[in-house]
Image: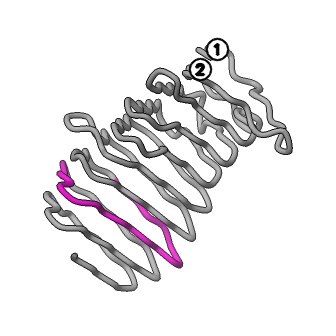
Amino acid sequence: RQALSATNVEEAFETVNSPMAINATGNISIATASATLNSNVRLDSSGGNVSISSNVDGQSALQTFANGSATLTGNFGGNTALADLDVQAASVSLSGQYNVQNDNEVTFRGPVEIAGDATVNHSGAGDITFFDTVDSTGGNNLTLTTADNQHTNFEANVGGTNALGSLTADGVELGKADAPNTVTGTPQVSFDT
């Protein structure tokens, strides 16, 4: 297992062959043309932001935890789907494509901004869950697809502050009974329930 601890981390890894954990009290920035995850990667910033700007492939898990923001820009699992994707931060910014194929749930914990058109495809036996609000920075589109009998879960409002251009989602469930929510302001909404 590889482990790196520092105040701020700027990394440009291309291939990860053993489990990797990067812990920082400041910011973590991953910027490379492409990266292959042959083993699980965990990025944990206890006092800063996590930023990934890359094309990331590999049948492994990618977990990001940030006390500040988490920004994921690029094509994740475009050639080889990821095994798991978990993002937890005070705010989350998504732009690009995210493909996951495993029995794990894809989770976004923290308010999400769709900073550019984004697509999340989960072809395994797991759900896609947004635990907080989902908004757009400029009318961007969000497409969510799940395997048969799986769900897309929204646990808070969608488009309540800044509308999405469009929202297309499979197997939608809108919140729990004790956490009512709405989809508002979005011109085009398409649900396959």
190 vs 103: above or below: above
Identify the disc placed on residue 56: none
Please give the range of residues in magenta. Answer: 33-52
- Label 2 near label 1: C-beta < 8 Å? yes
106 vs 124: above or below: below
Would you name the residue on which mark 2 appears?
166
Instruction: Give how far across and how far down residue 124 sits, in percent.
Output: 38, 33
User: Along the horizontal axis of the image, is 91 left or right of 9?
Assistant: right
Tag 2 secondary structure: strand
Q: Dot 2, crowdedness within 10 Å: few (<14), some or many (≥20)? A: some
Quadrant including the N terminus: bottom left
- Identify the image quadrant of residue 185: top right
Amino acid under label 1? Gln
> Which label's residue is closer to the chain start, 1 or 2?
2
- Identify the image quadrant of residue 162: top right
Q: Residue at x 69, y 22 (%)?
A: 186
Instruction: Give how far across and how far down residue 121 sits, in percent.
Output: 41, 30
Q: Residue at x 57, y 30 (%)?
A: 151
**Looking at the image, which is closer to me, 98 or 165?**
98
Identify the disc placed on residue 188: 1
Residue 38 lies in magenta, yes or no?
Answer: yes
Tag 1 secondary structure: strand
Seen as rendered, the residue at the extreme bottom is: 6
Residue 19 lies in magenta, yes or no?
Answer: no
Amino acid under label 2? Ser
**Looking at the image, which is closer to me, 12 or 101?**
101
